[in-house]
Image (cartoon, helix red, strand yellow):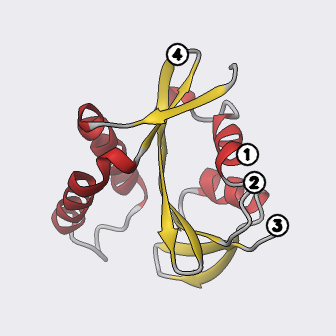
Amino acid sequence: MSDIFFEPADLSDFNGINELFHESVDKYEDAETISFDEIYAWFDRKLQKHVRDFERIRSDGRLCGYIYIHEYEDGLELDDFYLLKEYRGRGIGTKVLSARISTLEVPVYLYVFKRNEAAFHLYRKFGFEVIKDLGTRFIMKRSVGK
C-alpha cells in the first residue's frame, strides 16, 4: 500500500458510509441492549447532516474507507472511522491515525465497541485509554502529548 490521501466526502458517499455503519453495529452491538431500528435511524439523521464532514480515505486512487473528526468538549472526537473489509489488517488504520491524530495538541475522544478488538488495540497503540465503560462500548481518550 502506498501513501494515504484524504478528500471530502459528498452525498454520493451516503450509502457507502451507512453500509459500513450497519456492518459495524451488526457485528459488534448487543441486540438485547439496543434497538437496531432506533440506532440506524439515529445514524441516518446524523449522516444526512454531516456526510460532507466525512473524509474519504484513499490509497493508490482506491477508496479504502471514511473518517469523521469534529470538535468535542475540550478537544476533538474521532466520531466515525471505517475501513472497507478488503483494506483491514493492511496497516491503513495505522497510517490514517498517524496522519490525523498523532500530531494533535488537544485531547481526542472516541467510542469503540468492546468486541472490536482490532480497533481497540490500534487505539491503545496511539495512546488512547479507557475512561468509561458503557456496556458494549468504551469511551477512550488520548491526552495531549501521548
Label 2, residues with CA under 10 Å away: few <14, some 14-19, many ≥20 = some
Q: Distance between the residues labelled 3 and 2?
A: 8 Å
The residue at which mark 4 appears reads as: 61
Quadrant housing the C terminus: bottom right
Residue at 64% in and 48% down = 100
User: Which quarter of the figure has residue 14?
Assistant: top left
For this view, does 43 lie left or right of residue 83? left
Q: Distance between the residues labelled 4 and 2?
A: 24 Å
The residue at which mark 3 appears reads as: 146
Badge 3 element: loop
Badge 4 element: loop
The residue at which mark 2 appears reads as: 102
Label 4 amino acid? Gly
Label 3, residues with CA under 10 Å away: few <14, some 14-19, many ≥20 = few
Coordinates of residue 124 in the picture (x, y in percent): 74, 62
Mark 3 or mark 2, which has the lower sequence index?
2
Checking the image for residue 88, the label placed there is: none
For this view, does 79 lie left or right of residue 76? left
Mark 4 or mark 2, which has the lower sequence index?
4
Label 4, residues with CA under 10 Å away: few <14, some 14-19, many ≥20 = few
- State yes or no: discs 2 and 1 in contact (Cβ < 8 Å): yes
Mark 1 or mark 3, which has the lower sequence index?
1
Mark 4 or mark 1, which has the lower sequence index?
4
Badge 1 element: helix
Label 3 amino acid? Lys
Mark 4 or mark 3, which has the lower sequence index?
4
Residue 7 vs residue 18, the one in the foreground: 7
- State yes or no: discs 1 and 3 in contact (Cβ < 8 Å): no
The residue at which mark 1 appears reads as: 98
Label 2 amino acid? Ser
Q: How far apart are marks 4 and 1 (CA)?
A: 19 Å
